[in-house]
């Protein structure tokens, strides 16, 4: 099909796209009225016990709205997550060589595709030991890595030799720059010298100043006003001396209720980032299971809020392969969630332009108090095999340059395929089941598809019917797409 025809079809399709939460609203209707938020929760919990997950999700969404109306955004956020973990949403897409252009690209933003990055210790960990490097990770995933990232403290000099070394390999560097005392961030000799050295490095620099500021564990996030002032000041100094530095504003994935307080303004932010960790239990508590909370539920609110204005990035992300509190092998869990993440990046989030792996076993390598999960991707693991399969797609980029473009894009299919389409179809599935299955039917032809969710368009006539089923064979969602 000619590119112009596909792009015109894509423009119409995009108008039909809806946020993830729409999958909850399309569920079978719950009772039309709940008197209180507690009533909505009680009914939702009953439906969840009965296995009526779509009904339960709708009730929790209603409760979330009630909590927000009552002035309790934190409770609303909790119930929104409960709704999302039980909802089922399916997105289909087809690969093309070129997608629609993005206007007003940010500094170092790819015109198309997504950078891959990884933690790269330039000085060693808490114990002075190396915890891996980008070269070794590139070997394991069998492709180049575009970004090396590490942490550094405000007050230390810019790591110019590390940045130059990575630049020679075609990489940019992402620096999580953490000020212990936000009041010490001033337009002084130190800050100006840091910017000058960043410029002299010649490397593409993604400067993540004071990340995860919305979390209660950071000292620099105690005063939103002070944080905004400091971020804007750093931006001004970098703009003055270091045009190669992109400023990254990167809150934690939770909580989302307070992030607006910390946003320093569109004029000071080049990229919006988020830290994302997918675990099986929250806060090391067996009574707080998290295994149904996939990556999409955390990315979605950030994407809906910022993607029209800024490129997004996962500044660090990991999926647990073993948790301290559970102690069991969760390699298969990690493999599934990594596949879910990269399906979502390709199909749902075209302006999510960077994914950086936190490839580390925190059970042995973290500071005391943070030894909760193993996020490493070692040779021979199912998780590594899943990642290697996902990032083999040419959509992912292994080198940073000025607005590079991948050789592949994905165009969403919502109500109909392009006329006469007979190629490959990819899917992103978000559901309560860890092992969802797609049943594909077109006329008399049927397919059964498991991860990775890719299949050839069945030949024949008529619409394509896709049913998402859980591991017990129950239908969680049915989607019909016209296939002219």
Image (cartoon, rainbow, N blue to C red):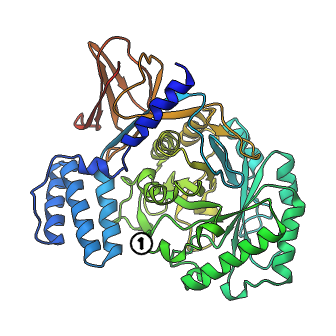
Q: Residue 289: x and y, percent?
A: 36, 60
The one of 227 and 156 positioned closer to us in this rendering:
227
Q: Residue at x 32, y 62 (%)?
A: 80
Q: Residue at x 81, y 45 (%)?
A: 170
Q: Residue 141: x and y, percent?
A: 66, 39
Please determine whether, in this image, residue 279 is positioned above or below residue 434: below
The one of 145 and 192 positioned closer to us in this rendering:
192
Q: Residue 390: x and y, percent?
A: 56, 36
Mark 1 crowd level (few <14, some 14–19, many ≥20, 10 Å Cα) = some
The one of 376 and 250 positioned closer to us in this rendering:
250
Residue at mark 1: 257
Per the image, label 1 sits on a secondary structure element best described as: loop
Q: Residue at x 87, y 75 (%)?
A: 193
Q: Residue at x 80, y 64 (%)?
A: 123
Numbered marks: total = 1
Please determine whether, in this image, residue 370 is positioned above or below residue 332: below
Which quarter of the rendering shows the C terminus? top left
């Amino acid at each position: 099909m000619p590119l112009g025809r596909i792009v015109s079809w894509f423009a119409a399709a995009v108008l039909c796209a809806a946020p993830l939460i729409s999958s909850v609203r399309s569920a079978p209707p719950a009772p039309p009225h709940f008197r209180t938020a507690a009533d909505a929760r009680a009914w939702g919990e009953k439906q969840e016990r009965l296995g009526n997950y779509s009904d339960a999700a709708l009730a929790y969404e209603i409760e979330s709205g009630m909590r927000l109306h009552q002035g309790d955004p934190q409770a609303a956020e909790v119930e929104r997550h409960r709704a999302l973990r039980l909802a089922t949403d399916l997105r289909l897409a087809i690969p093309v060589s070129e997608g629609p252009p993005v206007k007003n690209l940010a500094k170092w933003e790819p015109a198309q595709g997504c950078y891959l990055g990884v933690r790269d210790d330039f000085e060693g960990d808490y114990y002075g030991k190396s915890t891996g490097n980008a070269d070794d990770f590139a070997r394991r995933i069998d492709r180049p890595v575009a970004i090396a990232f590490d942490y550094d403290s405000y007050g230390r000099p810019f790591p110019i030799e590390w940045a130059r070394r990575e630049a020679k390999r075609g990489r940019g560097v992402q620096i999580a720059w953490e000020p212990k005392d936000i009041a010490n961030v001033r337009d002084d000799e130190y800050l100006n010298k840091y910017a000058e050295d960043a410029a002299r490095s010649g490397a593409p620099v993604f400067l993540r100043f004071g990340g995860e500021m919305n979390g209660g564990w950071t000292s620099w996030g105690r005063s939103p006003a002070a944080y905004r002032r400091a971020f804007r000041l750093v931006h001004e100094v970098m703009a003055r001396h270091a045009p190669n530095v992109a400023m990254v504003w990167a809150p934690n994935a939770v909580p989302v209720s307070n992030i607006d307080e910390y946003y320093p303004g569109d004029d000071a932010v080049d990229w919006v980032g988020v830290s994302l960790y997918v675990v099986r239990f929250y806060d090391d508590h067996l009574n707080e299971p998290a295994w149904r909370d996939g990556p999409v539920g955390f990315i979605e609110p950030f994407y809906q809020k910022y993607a029209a204005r800024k490129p997004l990035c996962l500044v660090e992300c990991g999926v647990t392969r073993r948790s301290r509190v559970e102690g069991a092998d969760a390699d298969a869990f990690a493999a599934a969630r990594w596949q879910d993440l990269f399906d979502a990046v390709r199909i749902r989030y075209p302006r999510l332009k960077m994914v950086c792996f936190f490839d580390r076993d925190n059970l042995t390598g973290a500071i005391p108090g943070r030894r909760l999960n193993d996020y490493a991707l070692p040779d021979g693991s199912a998780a590594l095999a899943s990642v290697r399969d996902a990032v083999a797609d040419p959509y992912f980029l292994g080198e940073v340059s000025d607005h590079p473009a991948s050789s592949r894009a994905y165009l969403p299919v919502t109500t109909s395929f392009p006329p006469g389409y007979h190629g490959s179809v990819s899917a992103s599935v978000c559901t309560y089941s860890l092992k969802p299955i797609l049943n594909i039917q077109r006329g008399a032809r049927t397919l059964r598809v498991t991860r990775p969710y890719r299949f050839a368009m069945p030949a024949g006539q008529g619409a394509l019917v896709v049913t998402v089923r859980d591991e017990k064979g129950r239908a969680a969602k049915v989607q019909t797409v016209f296939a002219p």
